[in-house]
């Protein structure tokens, strides 16, 4: 049997290849405000983390600070916290803040859809 015919009828030829999800890393801060994922971007030292901390103190939720992992999904973009910084805010001239300790565990989520 010729090789061409074997390949054409091989079950391996019909197997779908599933690509890994597209993952990007972006400098910024992701917060859920009234249920919407808001991604704050700007230059270093511009006050993104301080603005996020004020939102968290007012009852909104921190997803990620400083380095946000962004995954492209079928429904849009999903933002996640990177493991070394998950649960912490780094505010210029203040240092690292443990959000769970300062604002409670309800102030943290591991991931959120990015809406804005």
Image (spheres, rainbow, N blue to C red):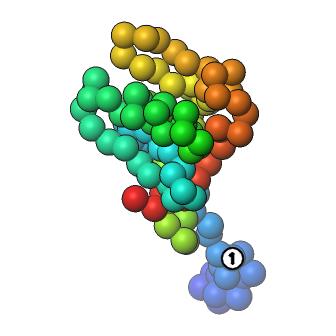
Q: Nearer the viewer, residue 20 or 38?
A: 38
- Confirm whether residue 6 shows in the render: no
Q: At numbered mark 1, what does the secondary structure look like: helix, strand or loop?
A: loop
Which residue corresponds to the image point at 32% horizontal and 42% vertical from the top-left?
A: 41
Q: Position of residue 36 (x, y in %)?
A: 51, 59
Quadrant of the rendered image containing residue 35: bottom right
**Residue matched to label 1:** 15
Q: Indicate left or right for 40 with 22 as reference.
A: left
Height in image: 108 above or below 14?
A: above
Q: Nearer the viewer, residue 107 or 45?
A: 107
Quadrant of the rendered image containing residue 26: top left
Q: Indicate left or right for 93 with 80 as reference.
A: left
Within 10 Å of disc 1 (Cα), the crowding (few <14, some 14-19, many 20+) is few
Which residue corresponds to the image point at 43% horizontal and 11% vertical from the top-left?
A: 94
Which residue corresponds to the image point at 54% horizontal and 50% vertical from the top-left?
A: 32
Height in image: 40 above or below 74?
A: above
Q: Indicate left or right for 19 with 110 as reference.
A: left
Q: Position of residue 101 (x, y in %)?
A: 69, 21
Q: Position of residue 109 (x, y in %)?
A: 66, 43
Q: In what quadrant of the picture does the C terminus appear? A: bottom left
- Confirm whether residue 66 shows in the render: yes
Q: Position of residue 5 (x, y in %)?
A: 65, 89
Which residue corresponds to the image point at 49% horizontal and 67% vertical from the top-left?
A: 76
């Amino acid at each position: 049997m010729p090789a061409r015919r074997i390949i054409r009828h091989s079950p391996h030829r019909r197997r779908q290849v599933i690509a890994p999800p597209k993952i990007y890393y972006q400098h910024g801060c992701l917060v859920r405000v009234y249920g919407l994922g808001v991604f704050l971007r700007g230059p270093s030292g511009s006050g993104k983390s301080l603005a996020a901390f004020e939102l968290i103190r007012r009852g909104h939720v921190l997803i990620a600070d400083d380095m946000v992992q962004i995954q492209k999904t079928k429904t849009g973009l999903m933002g996640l916290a990177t493991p070394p910084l998950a649960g912490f805010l780094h505010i210029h001239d203040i240092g690292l803040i443990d959000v769970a300790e300062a604002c409670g565990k309800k102030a943290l989520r591991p991931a959120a859809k990015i809406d804005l």
